Amino acid sequence: MIEIQPVYAELTDDLEMKLDEADHEAALSTTRLTHQDVFGKYQKRKIGCRKRNVQPIL
């Protein structure tokens, strides 16, 4: 039987670290990005893949 907690932690630790780094950099910078600036490229890619009926490669 697989213990859920260690597996979950292994999957999310890197993500949490990257989010912490992004928060730190945002606190140091005066530049503010819109939601579109941050996620626009991903959204366009995802929508384009939907139109072609393929899965996006992230």
Image (spheres, rainbow, N blue to C red):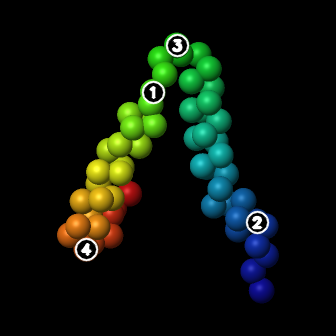
Lower position in the chain sequence, tag 4 or tag 2: 2
Instruction: Give the amino acid type for the residue marked by disc 3 in the picture.
Output: Thr
Cα–Cα gap, marks 2 and 3: 37 Å
Q: Position of residue 25 (x, y in %)?
A: 56, 24
Circle 3 — which element? Answer: loop
Cα–Cα gap, marks 1 and 3: 10 Å
Residue identified by numbered label 1? 33
Instruction: Give the amino acid type for the residue marked by disc 1 in the picture.
Output: Leu
Residue identified by numbered label 4? 53
The quarter of the picture where the N terminus appears is: bottom right
- Residue 30, relative to residue 23: is it above or below? above
Cα–Cα gap, marks 4 and 3: 40 Å
Lower position in the chain sequence, tag 2 or tag 1: 2
Residue identified by numbered label 3? 30
Residue identified by numbered label 2? 6
Q: Foreground mark, 2 or 3?
A: 3
Lower position in the chain sequence, tag 2 or tag 3: 2
Lower position in the chain sequence, tag 4 or tag 1: 1
Q: Position of residue 24 (x, y in %)?
A: 63, 26
Q: Residue furthest bottom?
A: 1
Residue toward you, 53 or 10: 53
Q: Quarter-wise, where is residue 23 in the image?
A: top right
* Residue shown at 44% from the left, 31% from the top: 34
Instruction: Give the amino acid type for the residue marked by disc 2 in the picture.
Output: Pro
Circle 2 — which element? Answer: helix
Cα–Cα gap, marks 4 and 1: 30 Å
